Image (cartoon, grey):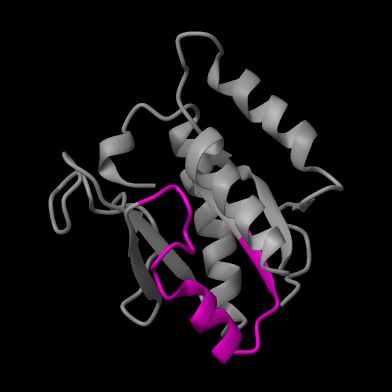
Amino acid sequence: MQNALSKLDQREHVIATINKRIDQYHQAKLPVIFIQHTEPEMEVASKNWQLFDRLHALGTDTFYNKTRPDSFYQTGLESFLKMNHLDSIEICGAQVEFCVDTTIRVAYHLGFTINLLIDGITTMDSNLLTAQQIKQHHAQIWKHRFTEFVTTTSPINC
C-alpha cells in the first residue's frame, strides 16, 4: 500500500477497508505492522516507498522494510511475532500475486494461523489477467488451505 502502486484496482475501497480494520486493532490495543517494499524506484524514504497518506498508520505501529515479496525474509517480523507470543496474523495489502501470496505461504509454513482481510487485498491488471481475476484465482487456492477469510465485521483473532 505504497505510493508506487498508484494504479491498484479498487484502491480507494481497499484503503477504506484496511483503515477500518487498522482502527479496530488500534482500539483493541493490538499491534499493527506495516511492511514496506524496497527496490529500485522505491528506495527507502522516497515518495514511491512511502505508504499511502490516507492509511491510518501511527508512530506507535511497527514498521519493517523488505527487499523480497516475502515479508519474513530478513525483516525481523518472525522474531517480533514470536517475542510477542503472536501465533495468529491477519494479512491485507498489495500485490496479491507477489507479496500477499508469498507472505501467506511463508507464514503458513512457519506455523502461523493466517486470516486474510479479503476486501483488504488488491493488485493491478497484468498482460494476461485482470486484477479481479488474479485475486479470485489466488483466493480459491488460499481458502481453507492456507488461510481463512475475514471482513471488518469479523472478530479479531490474536
Q: Is residue 132 above or below residue 143?
A: above
Count up the numbered dots: 0
Q: Position of residue 136 (x, y in %)?
A: 70, 27
When the figure is inspected, residue 107 is found, relative to residue 69, above or below; the finding is below
- Can you give x and y, in whole percent of width and height, for residue 104 in the image? 63, 52
Q: What residue is at 64 percent from the left and 19 percent from the top?
A: 133
Furthest toward the top, the residue is: 128
Q: Nearer the viewer, residue 52 or 134?
A: 134
Q: Position of residue 79 (x, y in %)?
A: 51, 82
Which sits in the foreground, 52 or 85? 85
**Is 71 within the magenta?**
yes
Quarter the C terminus occupies = bottom right
Q: Magenta stretch?
A: 68-90
Asked whether 29 or 50 is in front, the reply is 50
59 in the magenta segment: no
Q: Residue at x 20, y 45 (%)?
A: 42
Q: Position of residue 10 (x, y in %)?
A: 50, 29
- Residue 58 falls in image quadrant: bottom left
Residue closest to the eye, 75 or 151: 75
Would you say 69 lies left or right of 107 here? Answer: left
- Residue 141 vertical position relative to residue 133 in the rendered view, above or below: below
- Name the residue furthest left: 46
Q: Residue at x 76, y 73 (%)?
A: 157
Q: Residue at x 65, y 51 (%)?
A: 105
Left or right: where does residue 96 sit relative to residue 145? left
